[in-house]
Image (cartoon, rainbow, N blue to C red):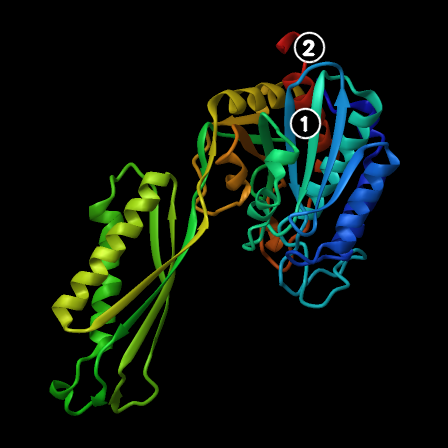
Amino acid sequence: MPIIPEIAARQAALTEIRRDIHAFPELAFEEARTAELVASQMERWGLEVHRGVGQTGVVGVIYNGDSKRVIGLRADMDALPIEEANQFAHRSRHAGCMHACGHDGHTAMLLGAAEYLAERRNFDGTVVLVFQPAEEGRGGAAAMIADGFFERFPVDAIFGMHNWPGMPAGRFGISPGPVMASADRFDIVVTGHGGHAAMPHLTVDPIVAAAALVTALQTIASRSIDPLDGVVVSVTQFHAGEAYNAIPGEARLCGTTRALRPAVRAATAQRMRQICDGIAAVHGVKVEFTWMDGYPPTVNTLAEAELCRAVAGELAGVEQVDWALRPSMGAEDFSNFLEHRPGCYVWIGNGPGEGGCTLHNKHYDFNDENLTLGASYWVRLVEAALAPEAL
């Protein structure tokens, strides 16, 4: 089952759409131009279109047949606050903003599928096309859910796809279970009693306590969590003092934690609080610990992962599908959708990633050769999930 011929014939048109989006990137919850491009294209093809879902999100709906089965397909639309270093014709025209993660390509691929599905409707059920804002750290999925996404579009399952530099173009990566980690943040303020550095015995040194805290936090992964469970605790900021000869009264630590399972995520937060309390008692300081929930782990459900594996194998060849890949400790807010419904998030190879063509890099660009493959994958997934014999 090769790339769908009608979609293959749209390579130039999809490339033009993708490069137009790339040239005019928009940050989280500012995707007005992109959202209007998406909405107007779907309206041209006769889809039911809903604007402003979760602020700047767009949802298209295609109905066919009598089945009550509903599936969702999701693409993200936002760009990153990065100054683009590429010099090709479609480079970003917005200073300090670029599509450095391929969301322009994700949007174009789903649009390519939308056009074909609207024309052919070779399925029995309802397809919900989700063009999500603000994936890059601003919680666009949660915003759509808070705006009544699942009440307004009651999907039975939802699917996502992301390009992956370093994976050869033409390949897919699919995993049952965890695909990406949670991403939470923390602030820790250590308060002591400052004074002259030559008389440390008259102070309560927050730097010594904070340094001990940094070391102690590293024992969470090595001693508090099962070695077979993935967890990361990274202190990424340490702020204290301004003078060479003065012990400050306060030190501040900031960082991020990552976990592949919700239970490990919760255990990590609990253990961090215990360590903070222990350091406070040992060093005679006050320790304020603040945990900020971010994205939960992205966890695929088995049946949906196996469906995606079968579809990708028929489309690209079974030898082009990597099954049960090791998870990434990066994070993705498609996880919020998967907390509510079964589904699967897959990788599509973007090529070798040479010359800085890696995610969140100022030299990145989406591989346009993927556009027809990705669009064909979406179509075949719909036809498989909503096939009449599957009812």
Say which element carries label 2: helix
Whether residue 264 is situated above or below residue 121 in the rendered picture: below
Q: Between 188 and 171, which is closer to the camera in this rendering?
A: 188
Where residue 211 appears, as percent x and y from the top left, is: 24, 69
Q: Which mark is residue 47?
A: none
Give the left or right position of residue 262, taking residue 130 as reference.
Answer: left
Image quadrant containing the C terminus: top right
Name the residue located 68 percent from the left edge and 48 percent from the top edge. 77
Specify the quadrant that holds the N terminus. top right
Quadrant of res 319 = top right
Residue pushed farthest right?
44
Residue 149 is drawn in which quadrant?
A: top right
Question: Where does label 1 land, which residue?
Answer: 377
Amino acid on which disc 2 is placed: Pro
Image coordinates for residue 288, horizontal then vertical, percent = 29, 67
The location of residue 309, given as percent across then percent down, is 56, 22
Can residue 273 be seen in the rendering of this structure?
A: yes
Location of residue 277 in the rendering, given as x and y in whole percent from the top left corner: 20, 62
The one nearer the camera, 240 or 187, is: 187
